[in-house]
Image (cartoon, rainbow, N blue to C red):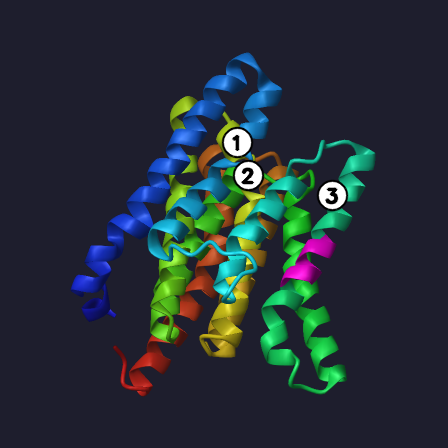
Amino acid sequence: MWALLRSSFVQAEFAHAVLVPAAAAMLVAVLSAVLASRTPHLGRRLALFAIPAAFLAGYFETYRNFTFPPATVLSWLPWFILALVAIDSLPDTTKRGAMAQLARVLASAAAAALLLWPILNHEAWPLALATGVGVTILWALPWAVAGAAGVAQPALASALLVVSLACALAAPLSGSVLLGQFAAALAAALGGSILIARLTRRAAPLEGVPAAIFILSVLLVDLRFYAGAAEGVVAGLFVSIIAGLAGSMAAHRYRLQGSRALGIAVLATLVPATYAIVTAFRLSQAGGGY
C-alpha cells in the first residue's frame, strides 16, 4: 500500500483528484454561507450544489468525459449528478417531501438499471430482476433517509468523509485506480464543505451532504460489478455508510452537538471501513499487489 501511495502516478494525480474539488467545494460553500446570512433560501439552494459541483470538478479534471449518449458506464456520472441535484432541490414540504422520496427511489432504480444493464442483459431475467431490485433498495434507502429530517448533517458529512477516504484506499487495491481518484475527489469535496462550515459557523455549506451517498453508491456499484472488487470490500464500505448514517441519526435524536456528534458518527464508520481496507489489502497481496 505504501509503495502505491508513494508512486509518482499517485503524487501526480493528487492535484487533480484532491486540490481541484476541494477548492471548488470551498468556493461554493463560502458563497452559500455568505448568502445564507442575507438570503437564507438562496444560500440553502446554492449549498445543494457545493458537494456535487466539487465532485464534478474532480471528475472532469481526472476523467474528462462528458458525452451524450454516454459512451461508457462512468460517462453516466455527470448526468446522474444533475438528476440528483434536481431531486434534492425540491422544496422541503410534506407534499414535496413525499415526491422527493419517490423521486429518489425512481432515480436509484433508473441509475442501477443503466449501470447494470451491460452485465445483467446476458443473465436470466429472474436473476437480473432480483439483482436490480436489490441494488436499488440498497442505493435508495440510505439516500432517502439522509435526505429526510432527523439527521445531524455535520456528523453525517464527517462520517461520509471517512467512508470516501476508505473507498479511495480500497479501490486501487481492488483493481481500479480511477474509482479511487473519484472517491478521493468526493472526500476532498466533503472536506472543503466541512471546513467552510466550521469556519463560518453555519450549516448552509452542508445542505448537499445526501448527494454524497448517491455518488458513493455509484462508485460502489462500479467497484463491485466492473472493477471486480471482492464482496467483503464493497460490503464493508456499504455498512460503513449505514453505520455513519445511524450514528448521525442518533446524534440528532439525543441532541448531541459538536465533537460528541462527530465522534459517534465517525467511530461508527471506522470498524467496517477499516475492515474494507484491510480486506482489499490482503486480497491485493495475495494476488501480487501493485
Magenta region, main secondary structure: helix
Q: Is residue 60 left or right of residue 5?
A: right
In reply to whether residue 21 is colored magenta, the answer given is: no
**Left or right relative to 12: residue 241:** right
N-terminal-most mark, 2 or 1: 1
Q: How many marks?
A: 3
On the image, the x and y values in percent for residue 29 come to 44, 30
Figure check: 2 above or below 162: below
Rendering coords of residue 32 (x, y %): 49, 25
Q: Which mark is residue 47?
A: 1
**For the residues bearing labels 2 and 1, Cβ distance under 8 angstroms:** yes
Indicate the amino acid at tag 2: Gly
Tell me the number on the disc at residue 100. Answer: 3
Residue 90, percent from left and from top: 70, 35
The residue type indicated by label 3 comes to Ala
Q: Quadrant of the C terminus?
A: bottom left
